[in-house]
Image (cartoon, rainbow, N blue to C red):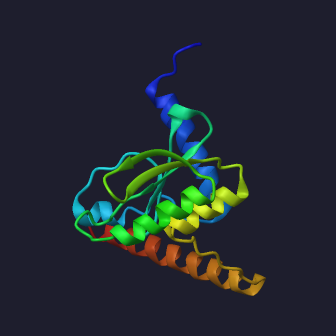
Amino acid sequence: MPQRSANRLYSYTSEKIRAFAAKYHVRLNDRRHERIYGLDANEDTIHGRYGEIVDDPTYGHVLAVKFIAVPRTANMKNRLLRRYRQALADGLSLKKKYGDAESTFHFDPDNDYQSRLAIRLVAARVQRTRILTDEQKKAIADRLLAARRSANGASSQNQNNV
């Protein structure tokens, strides 16, 4: 089997988690807690209140749901244990258990039931979608065009004054 470069593997895994996020309308890379706590993150993830959904390339076409306490100082033992038990009961395969409550499960992203269960268990943030009428779209386009014209006009005036 030919060796893959790290960049190719990363782009492959990013595409899988991105397709999953688009299919189930969940937010990808909501990096709020990384910014707050100064963490370094370089992979695409779906964050939730009780953990995250990440790609796990070591086991083929599976995604991993991780139940973790965020922030790390939070006392979420009972909530995480409840989610752990529910994931076991509903057929997600346990990969690793850390301490009392934190754990990692694998699930098949093509299985609709397991995917929706994983999203619900981590309480992932749903991506907001707006349905606009044609009049609303035209009004937005007109406002954008006017803003662009005024920005271009202001920049050209600044160049003339210099």
139 left or right of 28 in image: right
Left of 66 or right of it: where is 133?
right
> Which residue occupies the foreground of this view, 66 or 92?
92
Count of numbered circles on the image: 0
Q: Position of residue 31 (x, y in %)?
A: 38, 61
Tell me: residue 24, above or below residue 57. below
Task: Compare residues 36 and 160 and report the one nearer the observer.
Answer: 36
Q: Is residue 92 placed above or below 27 in the rendered structure?
A: above
Residue nearest the viewer, comparing 156 with 66 = 66
- Please tell me in which quadrant of the rendered image residue 136 appears: bottom right
**Left or right: residue 162 compared with residue 94:** left
Q: Nearer the viewer, residue 137 or 109?
A: 109
Residue at horizontal 63%, vertical 53%?
Answer: 91
Q: Which residue is depicted at the point 35% across and 66% down?
A: 32
Q: Is residue 87 above or below residue 74?
A: above
Measuring from the top left, give residue 65's x and y in whole percent: 50, 53
Q: Is residue 50 visible?
A: no
Residue positioned 57% across, 70% down in the render: 127
Q: Visible in this render: residue 83?
A: yes
Quadrant into which the N terminus falls? top right
